[in-house]
Image (cartoon, rainbow, N blue to C red):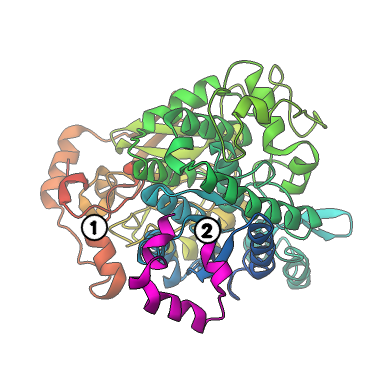
Amino acid sequence: MRSDAMKKDVEKAPHRSLFKAMGYTQAELERPLIGIANSANEIIPGHIHLDRICEAVKAGVRMAGGTPIEFSTIGVCDGIAMNHAGMRYSLASREIIADSVEIMGMAHPFDGLVLIPNCDKIIPGMLMAALRLNIPAIVVSGGPMLAGRIGSKPLDLISVFEGVGAYKAGSISLSDLEAMEESACPGCGSCSGMFTANSMNCLTEALGLGLPGNGTIPAVTAARIRLAKTTGMQIMELVRNDVRPRDIASRKAFENAMAVDMALGCSTNTVLHVPAIAHEAGIELGLDLFNTVSARTPHLCSLRPGGAHFLEDLNAAGGVPAVMKELSSKGLVHLDITTVTGKTVGENLEHAKVADNSIIKPIDAPYHKEGGIAVLYGNIAPLGAVVKQSAVAPEMLQRTGRARVFGSESEAATAIFEGAIQAGDVVVIRYEGPKGGPGMQEMLTPTAAIMGRGLGKDVALITDGRFSGGTQGAAIGHISPEAAVGGPIALVEEGDSIRIDIPNKKIELLVDDAVLAKRRTAWTPPKPRVSEGYLARYAHLVTSGATGAILKIEDDGAEGPL
């Protein structure tokens, strides 16, 4: 066993003594030692209950003949970190989470790992670590939150963000907003729509590294506890058979995950996380592949924020297996690859079925013929930009507007709240990329404010930052190269015309090349916003949003001026 390195033979008597100081018996030490990375904390609603999930996992490990050993990781609540300096740390935390699991898994040679995430950056961080370490591993999330209710009307966290904009626009009262605040998030779990957390938990299942149900079984149900126990038992099977993450997460598996991404209408943050996870497996996924998969994969589920349904509805309709079953009818997923169940994808889907065609549309009658995400290119985004096209109003799919330029998210949000943004504007937020932010802040506050003020069919927003999975509307992010390294978005001036053409995957700054060349000669790099601490180191090492904002020691992967 891998754990023999810290527990076997006479030389390890001191090591065994330290284990026994914690109450481990000799019998426990003779069994496979299973590390359990538990990201429970008291600042994330999706993680407040993870100790209960962890206890269920431990029970499963013990039932199957192993010894569970729990350790912790950090986690950031994106909602609570939103629209202040804390958001700079959100994406950057992904790397710390991956590194911490790597450190624990190498410093203490466990025989296998169970990873317990639930929210935004914790999921990809743990998956990156699993593929980096490549020891038997399996993921079980904490599950999605139930939708809130005011009377018979369902709502979620995004309802509250949009409610702030509506209140500032005078369309709802303060008591209306307070009612939303009290009701939108009724209990534990990852926020109830197809936002980033639930997107990544569903894709973990589609990738084959989580058991069926991982993405959709609600947090508060007994079924989630049973899933956790089953996960604890299944890690023992993976250890006995020496099945490792890279045996499962092949290029075909990533293509399956991307197909499910498109069918579900997942968060644009998946375009950052999926390539970063694949990179740890030695698989490079270019942005063009997202367009390729999107072009052949219909959008089957209209979930919040782009639609009316919630994760609990998707779960009742059959969950991710039902979606994959529907996709398989047109050969859009690979069925011959293995998963953590010990079975192939095809075997896992044998009994899957769609229970409600109003929630999971038939593949021949989808919501949209193309998938939920599109990558756009043009002179303002030579390396690409990302939009959740399934959440864009038809009126905004093709639009030319006038640039309103802001150097930070906070400046733009203030202008929107004060009514300075009008129909026909394209809000440009720059210097918020991976290096410039630093940390590539989410732009939920300004996008929600646009929706809340009733401008979702009239105003676009583009940025070198990123968006919450809860963002809807013509919100185009990840513009690369970013402004801080001299990308063309740095050259946009107030009043410039910008043409957006999502069906044709184009975004263009309608300014003559000669004018842009003159502007470039006058441009100078801005002074870094952060010059000390972790974010300063992160800004030095982070690469483009077009490459998943991974970290590289050498500067050869970082984008430079064009």
Which residue shows up at 54% across the image and 72% down it?
26
Residue 18 drawn in magenta:
yes
Tell me the kind of residue under disc 1.
Leu
Q: Nearer the viewer, residue 224 or 123?
A: 224
Dot 2, how many residues are within 10 Å of its Cα: few (below 14), some (14-19), or many (20+)? many
Residue 541: mark in rendering: 1
Disc assigned to residue 32: 2
The correct choice, above or below, for 121 with respect to 410 in the image is above
- Front tag of 2 and 1: 2
Amino acid carrying mark 2 in the image = Pro
The answer to if 499 sits in the magenta stretch is no
Image coords of residue 158 (percent x, y): 65, 57
Q: Disc 2 and disc 1: Cα gap in Å?
A: 37 Å
- Chief secondary structure of the magenta span? helix
In the rendered image, which quarter is residue 28 located in? Answer: bottom right
Q: From this viewpoint, is residue 413 visible?
A: yes
Residue at disc 1, secondary structure: helix
Residue 160 rendering spot, x and y as whole percentages = 67, 62
Q: Residue at x 54, y 57 (%)?
A: 115
Which residue is pictured at 62% across the width and 48% down the height? 234
Comparing 264 with 490, the one in front is 264
Percent x, y of residue 61 = 63, 58
Task: Estimate the x, y position of residue 494 in percent, counting from the top left.
Answer: 33, 50
Which residue sits at x=15%, y=35%? 514
**Left or right: where 362 falls relative to 210:** right
Stretch of the chain drawn in magenta: 1-30
Question: For mark 1, does the 10 Å Cα neighbourhood hold few (<14), some (14 to 19), or many (20 or more) residues?
Answer: some
Q: Nearer the viewer, residue 284 or 170?
A: 284
